Each structure stands twice: as structure tokens, then as C-alpha cells.
Amino acid sequence: MWGDNKWDPTKATALAKEFEAEQQRKHQEKLAKNKADREAKRRAAKIKPPEEYPWMKDKQGD
């Protein structure tokens, strides 16, 4: 691979930019997934029926 090839700074810069763009994309996907997971957990917590909240039993007149 390294035989007669000379160092090409433009190619190296392009590869570095491509690598950086890939890392940025992966990071954004990870952040989006984490945000979606948090939203799902929040929605699931809001859907709980009142009997799952023990501190509310006395307020319901049970």
C-alpha cells in the first residue's frame, strides 16, 4: 500500500474531514436516540394509573 505512493496532504485532509463528519454523524445519532429514549420513559411515567401512586390514595378518598 505504501510502496510508491507519496504523502498527499490534500488526500489526507479529505480523509480527515470525512472521518470527522462520520464521527459527528454518529454522535448526533447517539444524542437523538438518547433523547428519544428519555421522551419514551417520560411518556410511560405519565401514563401510570393513579393506584400506582401510593401518596395519592389518601387524596382520592380511599
Image (tube, rainbow, N blue to C red):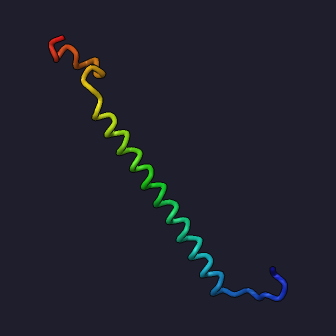
Give residue 8's quadrant in the image. Answer: bottom right
Q: Quadrant of residue 45?
A: top left
Q: Farthest residue to the right: give it.
A: 3
Position of residue 11 in the picture relative to residue 61 (left or right): right
Judged left or right of residue 45, residue 24 is: right
- Residue displayed at 35% across by 45% down: 39
Compare residues 11 and 40 and report the one nearer the observer. Answer: 40
Q: In this view, does 53 lie to the left or right of 31?
A: left
Relative side of 58 to 43, left or right: left
Could you tell me residue 50's position as x and y percent?
A: 24, 23
Residue 7 vertical position relative to residue 16 in the rendered view, above or below: below
Residue located at (25% from left, 18% from top): 55
Q: Establish if 38 lies above or below 10.
A: above
Q: Tag count in the figure?
A: 0
* Residue 28: image location, x then y, percent: 46, 61
Q: Residue furthest top?
A: 62
Quarter of the image that includes the N terminus: bottom right
Residue at 39% x, 49% y is 36
- Where is the C terminus found, in terms of image quarters? top left
Query: Could you say which is closer to the camera, residue 34 or residue 40?
Result: 40
Up the image or down, 48 lies above or below 2; here it is above
Quarter of the figure with residue 38: top left
Which residue shows up at 33% across the image and 39% down it?
42
Q: In this view, does 1 lie above or below 51?
A: below
Residue 3 rendering spot, x and y as whole percentages: 84, 84
